[in-house]
Image (cartoon, grey):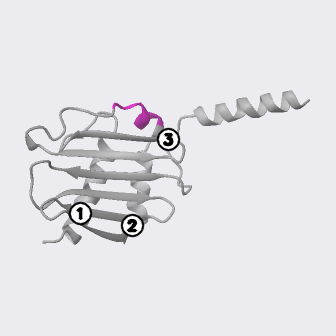
Amino acid sequence: MRKIGFVLAFFSTIFLACTSSPVEADGGLKVVSGSSFGFCLGYCMQEMRLTDASQNIEMEFFNVRDAKSKSYTDQLNKDDWEEILAEVDLDTFFKLNSVYGCPDCADGGAEYIEISSGVKNHRVTFEYGHEVEGIEKLITLLREQRLAFAEKHLPQ
């Protein structure tokens, strides 16, 4: 009897883990979006971190010239978070390559998106200003949030 229970539990766990669907907000999702430029002085690297547990947006700017960083925290609008969340399809994202194009070649800059689901973590890096097939809208939404937050907080 124990073996049957174990087998049922095992296969139901596999079935539930393998189903494909957009992410539900449950406190375990973390989305990171950033950009960097290799040959640059000033605030050349920035990273935005979003977590569904608090809907906080954390932004960090790194100044290459003096090796200092500045961090800011703000509250992400619930509608904006839900729009981003609707574009996160873990199955699609985790199947993407780690690198697209030639990020930061000839100082063209690089962008990246990293998603942690609590179980898996994957980072996709691509050329600044470009898009990756399958996650175009996610890139656009995160880029818009990152640029708006930088405009509001970027040290001058």
Left or right of residue 85: residue 127? left
Viewer-closest of 82 and 128: 128
Residue 150 x, y percent position in the rendering = 22, 64
The disc label shown at residue 102, or none? none
Q: Is residue 57 above or below residue 141?
A: below
Residue identifier under label 3: 120
Residue identifier under label 1: 61
Quadrant position of the C terminus in the picture: bottom left
Q: Residue at x 35, y 64 (%)?
A: 58
Tell whether position 36 is magenta. Answer: no
Rounded to the nearest whole Å, what is the CA distance between mark 1 and mark 3? 26 Å
Disc 1 to disc 3: CB gap under 8 Å: no
Q: Quadrant of residue 2?
A: top right
Residue identifier under label 2: 77
1 or 2: tag closer to the N-terminus: 1
Q: Quadrant of residue 18?
A: top right
Neighbourhood count class around disc 3 (C-alpha, 10 Å): few under 14, some 14–19, many 20 upward:
few
Quadrant position of the N terminus in the picture: top right
2 or 3: tag closer to the N-terminus: 2
The magenta segment is: 91-97
